[in-house]
Amino acid sequence: MKLLKTYVILIVIVAIFAGAMFALNLHTGPIIEKNNAGAANDKLNAVMPGGSGYEDITATLTARPASVTTVYKETSGLGFVMLCTAESSYSTAPMEITLGIAADGKISGVEITAYNDTASFDFRTKDPSYLASYVGQDSALADVGLVAGSTFSSTAFRNSIVAAMEVMTANNLIAAGVKGDDQILTELIPTVAPGFTKLAEAEGTGNIQKVFTAENGTGFAYIVNSGDATVLAIVNAMGVCKVYDVEGADITANAADVVAEAVAHASATPNKFTDDLTTKVGRMMEGAADITPIALDTFNTVVSAVSFTVDGTTYYAFYSRSIGFHQMDVFFVIDENGAITKMDAKQFIFDEEYFMAFGGMDVTAYKDGFVGITGDTFTGDEVIIATATMTSNAIKESTQDVFTAFNALKGGAQ
């Protein structure tokens, strides 16, 4: 009898405990879900102060690039939060960005939730105020530049923000900011002069408002007053100038005064690239004679070009300065048919200890692998150096630019 009573008591206790747990789950379940939602919103609230809730509107948007992964609308009308990515030549994986845009079209906050570029080029370390410089900016981003010493990473970051803002304006969610002529022309530089990397800005003189110097020596860009207009003049390392208006039209033929002023300014800076190339040709090609400099209207990484002869046969040599892990100096000799005869570089690998898996390279075999390649047969696979991705990419750019320069020399497409 006592045993039966004991079982009954145990059953009652279990029932009471089960009922209590069920009741507790009824009350705590929604709390847990709410807390989880709150944790998820913390990431969004960090760039949208005062946010109360968010609706995913990604599927309703058009003209959305892959770099804009998710777009949320803040439910009380404060604005929008966007999850974006950015990737540069230094990226091990896409950079992850959270961007807040207030209802008035100005940036309310921006954070990097995953920085996957090379740590030594982290622009947050080089310029701790850089992210804050975006706050309060509209889609024009008029007062936001790049970070010296972290040009590729900060460019990738800025381009991602630009793409995000364009999604907002294209879908009429915010009003577009207004860009001045100065900003429009400055942003045109990478388009018309893609080889002008790591631009350093300085004040100009005379009609020149601003001077941009390419740190790799490929040339100069100038914002110039021309009558009632403001124009962009670019001068490459070979002294050739082109002028563009705010619409991006080439107006060189009608801008003689601008050309003269820009070329005069650029020529004041000593340029020894042709001397270096002439010396290199003498070492690469025994019997080289009649070495003659050539000025080309290309604005990529090619800083010098010459023609020369060996036993009566004409060849062309090119000197390219692309950016790999450090500054690259790459040389090519091309025959009259457009095939590479010789290829060399001052240095292929920098800081070997940085490349943990680098097992060395057969430099002679690597250079010989370029011989005979033309612009039509070049695939890009020829440039690959195991584990040295940045150097490989730089040599690829140099090779492509040299073929572009050769085509320009021969009157082909640039």
Image: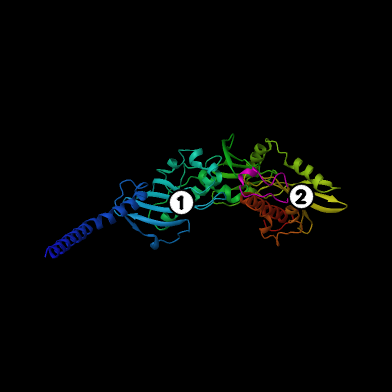
Residue 245 at least partly seen:
no
Q: Which residue is mark 1?
A: 96
Residue at horizontal 31 percent and vertical 52 percent from the top: 38
Colour mode of the rendering = rainbow
Tell me the SS state at disc 2: strand
The C terminus sits in image quarter: bottom right
Tell me the SS state at disc 1: strand
Question: What is the number of the mark on residue 265?
Answer: none
Give the amino acid type for the residue marked by disc 2 in the picture: Ala
Task: In this rendered view, identify the residue nearer to me: 406 or 117.
Answer: 117
- Asked whether the beta carbons under mark 1 and mark 2 sit within 8 Å of each other, the answer is no
Query: Looking at the picture, how far across and down is residue 255, in whole percent?
Result: 63, 45
Task: In this rendered view, identify the residue nearer to me: 188 or 404.
Answer: 404
Q: Main secondary structure of the magenta part?
A: loop
- The reply, left or right, for residue 235 in relation to residue 9 is right
Task: In this rendered view, identify the residue nearer to me: 336 or 87.
Answer: 87
Q: Which residue is mark 2?
A: 317
The N terminus sits in image quarter: bottom left
- Specify start and end residues of the magenta stretch as a single range: 345-364
Mark 1 to mark 2: distance in Å?
43 Å
Residue at horizontal 23 percent and vertical 58 percent from the top: 25
Q: Is residue 353 magenta?
A: yes
How many marks the image carries: the answer is 2
Residue at horizontal 45 percent and vertical 56 percent from the top: 68
Task: In this rendered view, identify the residue nearer to me: 308 or 10.
Answer: 10
Residue 88 at least partly seen:
yes
Mark 1 surroundings within 10 Å by alpha-carbon count, few (fewer than 14), some (14 through 19), many (20 or more): many
Query: Looking at the picture, how far across and down is residue 254, in whole percent?
Result: 63, 48
Give the amino acid type for the residue marked by disc 1 in the picture: Glu
Q: Is residue 175 magenta?
A: no
Q: Quadrant of residue 62?
A: bottom left
Query: Looking at the picture, how far across and down is residue 320, in whole percent?
Result: 69, 47
